[in-house]
Image (cartoon, rainbow, N blue to C red):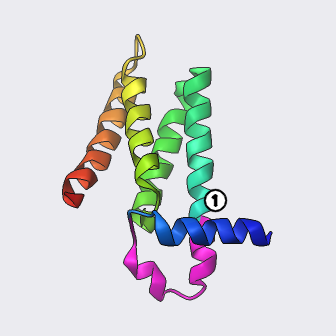
Amino acid sequence: MNNNKQNIEKISKDNLQKPNVYNKFLPFYETIEQQSFESFKEICENLSRIIQLRELRPGFPLWSSKLQQFISLYGFCFTKIDHIKLIHLYLSVLSINDLDFSHVKTCFDMIYDLLRFELILK
């Protein structure tokens, strides 16, 4: 348990891009921070599982909306490497044959949100 907490502290202080600054003023900030890491891990695992199994119908819009909610609640509370991996993931979904319009729109919306932040950082 302590090792997990130390890993979270190391990640949180060193490599995060732009977490929501207002979360620091909330009570139980440490729990919120830990919850953000667990939530991001769950979102990434489920998005990758959906892509690997090619079962986009029920899960892809759901987990993409959860990623958008995560970004609005916690900011870009993940590393730059994870940010680039998310962009590549959504680009890889666009290369799937016979993709529905709703999935294409979801991909373009997420890519826009992720790349817009990249432009803000520069």
Locate residue 37 relative to residue 95 in the image: left or right.
right
Q: Quadrant of residue 93?
A: top left
| Residue 121 spot, x, y in % from top left | 24, 59
Instruction: Please tell me which residue is depicted at 40% across the width and 72% down the height of the picture.
Output: 20
What span is colored magenta in the figure?
A: 18-35
Instruction: Please tell me which residue is depicted at 41% across the width and 59% down the height of the picture.
Output: 71
| Residue 62 spot, x, y in % from top left | 52, 42
- Label 1 element class: helix
| Residue 94 spot, x, y in % from top left | 36, 23
Q: Is residue 28 magenta?
A: yes
Q: Main secondary structure of the magenta part?
A: helix
Q: Quadrant of the C terminus?
A: bottom left
Q: Nearer the viewer, residue 74 or 80?
A: 80
Query: Callout 1: few (<14), some (14-19), or many (20+) C-alpha neighbours within 10 Å?
Result: few
Q: Is residue 97 magenta?
A: no
Amino acid type indicated by mark 1:
Glu
Residue that protrudes farthest toward the right in the picture: 1
Q: Nearer the viewer, residue 63 or 87?
A: 87
Q: Which residue is mark 1?
A: 38
Q: Quadrant of the N terminus?
A: bottom right
Q: Nearer the viewer, residue 8 or 112?
A: 8
Q: How many labels were placed on the picture? A: 1
| Residue 39 spot, x, y in % from top left | 59, 57
Instruction: Please tell me which residue is depicted at 36% across the width and 29% down the height of the picture.
Output: 91
Locate residue 119 relative to residue 85 in the image: left or right.
left
